[in-house]
Amino acid sequence: MANAIRVFLVIGVQLTIKLGIIGYRNHASRLISLCAQIESCKIEFIYHPTKSLDDQRFTNNFSDLLNCDAIIIATPNHTHFEYIKKLLENFNGYIFCEKPPVTSLNDIETLVKLPTKTKEKVFFNFNHRFSRLGKIIENIQEHRDSSSTQIGNIIHINFVMNHGLAFKEQYLKSWRSNGQKNLHNILDTLTIHYLDLCNFLFGNPLHVSYFPSLMSKNGSSYDTCNLSVQYVDGKTVSISNSYATPYINEIAIIGTNGVISISENQLNIRSPRDTFDEKGFFTAAPIISSQEFDTENEYDDSLKNSLSYFISKIEKGKPISLEHFKTSLETNRLILQLHNK
């Protein structure tokens, strides 16, 4: 079977990674476009069980996928587990699955019990782990014991990402507004990214409080939520998201010696803590660094980086870090537990 992964350099010749993609619209279309830009990859098949598309790569035959080196699952959330299960029964290659991994706690337990070698070939796309923001926070963490760190140890991170989607006419016609099927849609599609990034960098949360609401009165699913999280070492995170406000995209990383603020495509670092006015009172620390931070392109860049990480493992025939698999399931588990609360 061709999906027995090989090293992709043979006598100086780079071999092609054959990709199969399950899904073709919306986010799947974005992934198809990105994969087409990777020189070492060739999209062999695009699968849908019933639809037809004027594309020679399109197939309704699931078994066609089994001859690929890797398969990307970019389908509705509730279908993820069935596709993963079906592939693990018949496929030995790498699997890239969009987040969240699954939609039930029982399915998580099934994945937890998979053999280690299987887990090392399954990657869930929580792409904010590969974002510029993630690298900034990771760098602070790595130097948290150094007195020379510009902002010191992280005490709190505040994320506010809002816009007015709930007031657009098409919102009422979309799956997002349907409370019977997607009551926690903003938690599942937006908040989850920032929660997972912090979980990946800081470990499992000690306490989590979840406050959802329907503020626009449009549709029947929650359009607004706030998540308050505390980690084992005491640091806290607040994530505030809404589809019912003007556009806001702001982040504050507050440390013992300074603050990083990101707003309106600008990243500013203020330090040191011991900044005083003429009366000897604490006052705002000066801006010691200012740089452009394109929040609009952050998502696209992190998606490219996440896909590149996955492809690099295939090229080298290497296992994917188990930390990625483990954190994906823990974030998924936490989100589902919040649903039940």
Image (cartoon, rainbow, N blue to C red):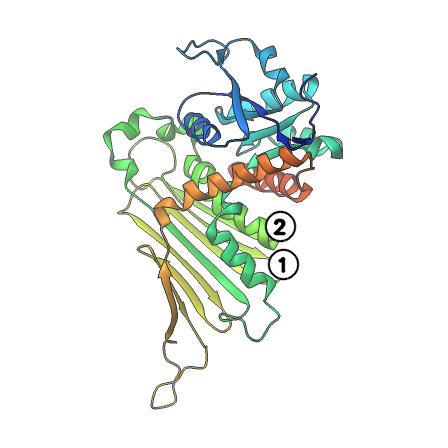
Q: Evaluate whether residue 341 shows in this view.
A: no
Disc number placed over residue 232 in the picture, else none: 1
| Residue at figure coordinates x 35%, y 86% from the top left | 277
Q: Tell me whether the residue at label 2 lies in contact with that at label 1, contact meaning CB atoms closer than 8 angstroms.
A: yes
> Residue extending furthest front?
11
Mark 1, other Cα within 10 Å: few <14 / some 14–19 / many ≥20: few
Q: Percent position (x, y) of residue 236?
A: 52, 59
Residue at left offset 62%, top offset 50%: 204
Mark 2 closeness class: few <14, some 14–19, many ≥20 residues within 10 Å: some
Tag 2: residue type? Answer: Asn
Residue 187 vertical placement versus 248 (above, below): above
Above or below — where is 240 with respect to 74? Answer: below
Q: Can residue 201 be spotted in the picture?
A: yes
From the viewer's perspective, is 182 left or right of 167? right
Q: CA distance from mark 2 to mark 1?
A: 8 Å
Decide if residue 195 is on the left or right side of residue 171. right
Q: Give the answer, above or below, for where 77 lies relative to 333.
A: above
First along the sequence among labels 2 and 1: 2
Question: Badge 2 is on which residue?
Answer: 204
Residue 214 position by quadrant: top left
